[in-house]
Image (tube, grey):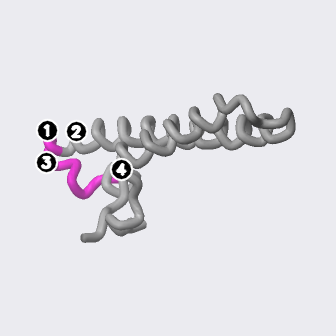
Amino acid sequence: MKVKKDELMTMMEASALIKQRVAETLRTDLSPEERHEANEQSRLCLGFAKQAINLADVTLRGEKLMAQCKSLNNSRINAVLGEIED
Protein backbone atom coordinates (compact mmCIF):
# COMPACT_ATOMS: atom_id res chain seq x y z
CA MET A 1 0.00 0.00 0.00
CA LYS A 2 1.37 3.39 -0.94
CA VAL A 3 0.85 6.40 1.31
CA LYS A 4 1.06 10.00 0.13
CA LYS A 5 3.38 12.25 2.10
CA ASP A 6 0.64 14.84 2.66
CA GLU A 7 -1.48 12.16 4.40
CA LEU A 8 1.15 11.54 7.08
CA MET A 9 1.21 13.23 10.48
CA THR A 10 4.56 14.52 11.66
CA MET A 11 5.80 13.89 15.17
CA MET A 12 5.43 17.63 15.84
CA GLU A 13 1.76 17.52 14.80
CA ALA A 14 1.20 14.48 16.99
CA SER A 15 2.92 16.21 19.90
CA ALA A 16 0.70 19.28 19.47
CA LEU A 17 -2.40 17.08 19.43
CA ILE A 18 -1.33 15.33 22.63
CA LYS A 19 -0.62 18.70 24.27
CA GLN A 20 -4.11 19.89 23.28
CA ARG A 21 -5.72 16.73 24.71
CA VAL A 22 -3.81 17.10 28.00
CA ALA A 23 -4.95 20.74 28.30
CA GLU A 24 -8.55 19.69 27.62
CA THR A 25 -8.36 16.94 30.24
CA LEU A 26 -7.00 19.32 32.88
CA ARG A 27 -9.75 21.93 32.46
CA THR A 28 -11.55 22.62 35.73
CA ASP A 29 -14.75 24.04 34.20
CA LEU A 30 -16.00 20.73 32.77
CA SER A 31 -19.01 18.87 34.07
CA PRO A 32 -18.47 15.21 35.05
CA GLU A 33 -20.00 14.10 31.74
CA GLU A 34 -17.81 16.49 29.71
CA ARG A 35 -14.73 15.38 31.68
CA HIS A 36 -15.56 11.73 30.98
CA GLU A 37 -15.90 12.48 27.25
CA ALA A 38 -12.63 14.47 27.23
CA ASN A 39 -10.84 11.63 29.02
CA GLU A 40 -12.16 9.08 26.53
CA GLN A 41 -10.97 11.18 23.60
CA SER A 42 -7.59 11.60 25.28
CA ARG A 43 -7.29 7.83 25.77
CA LEU A 44 -7.97 7.30 22.08
CA CYS A 45 -5.42 9.93 21.02
CA LEU A 46 -2.76 8.53 23.34
CA GLY A 47 -3.44 5.02 22.07
CA PHE A 48 -2.93 6.21 18.50
CA ALA A 49 0.23 8.05 19.52
CA LYS A 50 1.63 4.91 21.15
CA GLN A 51 0.84 2.90 18.03
CA ALA A 52 2.53 5.55 15.84
CA ILE A 53 5.67 5.42 17.99
CA ASN A 54 5.75 1.63 17.75
CA LEU A 55 5.27 1.75 13.97
CA ALA A 56 8.03 4.35 13.63
CA ASP A 57 10.34 2.06 15.60
CA VAL A 58 9.52 -0.90 13.34
CA THR A 59 10.07 1.24 10.25
CA LEU A 60 13.45 2.51 11.44
CA ARG A 61 14.59 -1.00 12.36
CA GLY A 62 13.46 -2.33 8.97
CA GLU A 63 15.22 0.43 7.07
CA LYS A 64 18.38 -0.16 9.11
CA LEU A 65 18.28 -3.87 8.25
CA MET A 66 17.77 -3.11 4.56
CA ALA A 67 20.65 -0.60 4.57
CA GLN A 68 22.94 -3.18 6.20
CA CYS A 69 21.95 -6.02 3.89
CA LYS A 70 21.14 -4.93 0.32
CA SER A 71 19.63 -8.36 -0.49
CA LEU A 72 16.66 -7.45 1.74
CA ASN A 73 15.59 -4.56 -0.51
CA ASN A 74 13.15 -6.76 -2.45
CA SER A 75 12.06 -8.84 0.54
CA ARG A 76 8.88 -9.00 2.59
CA ILE A 77 10.24 -6.20 4.77
CA ASN A 78 9.47 -3.76 1.93
CA ALA A 79 5.91 -5.09 1.74
CA VAL A 80 5.43 -4.74 5.49
CA LEU A 81 6.87 -1.22 5.64
CA GLY A 82 4.98 0.00 2.57
CA GLU A 83 5.95 2.84 0.30
CA ILE A 84 5.55 6.59 0.42
CA GLU A 85 4.66 8.42 -2.77
CA ASP A 86 6.21 11.83 -3.41
- Report the residue marked by disc 2: 65
Q: Are marks 2 and 1 in contact (CB under 8 Å)?
A: yes
Marks 1 and 4 sit apart, C-alpha to C-alpha, by: 26 Å
Query: Which numbered disc, 4 or 3, marks the residue closer to the eye?
Result: 4
Query: Which numbered disc, 2 or 4, marks the residue closer to the eye?
Result: 4
Task: Please tell me how crowded label 4 is: few (under 14), some (14-19), or many (20+) other residues with Cα within 10 Å.
Answer: few
Q: Which quarter of the picture shows residue 37?
A: top right
- The disc placed on residue 68 is 1
Horizontally, is 80 left or right of 65 in the view?
right
* Residue 70 among those drawn in magenta: yes
Residue 36 image position (x, y, % from top left): 80, 36
Magenta segment main secondary structure: helix
Marks 2 and 3 sit apart, C-alpha to C-alpha, by: 8 Å
Q: What element carries label 3?
A: helix
Q: What element carries label 4?
A: loop
Residue 49 image position (x, y, % from top left): 51, 39
Q: Which quarter of the picture shows residue 82?
A: bottom left
- Report the residue marked by disc 4: 10
Q: Which amino acid lies under the numbered mark 4 shown in the image of this protein? A: Thr
Q: Which amino acid lies under the numbered mark 1 shown in the image of this protein? A: Gln
Horizontally, is 82 left or right of 22 in the view?
left
Q: Which amino acid lies under the numbered mark 2 shown in the image of this protein? A: Leu
Residue at horizontal 58 percent and vertical 39 percent from the top: 21
* Residue 72 among those drawn in magenta: yes
Marks 2 and 1 sit apart, C-alpha to C-alpha, by: 5 Å
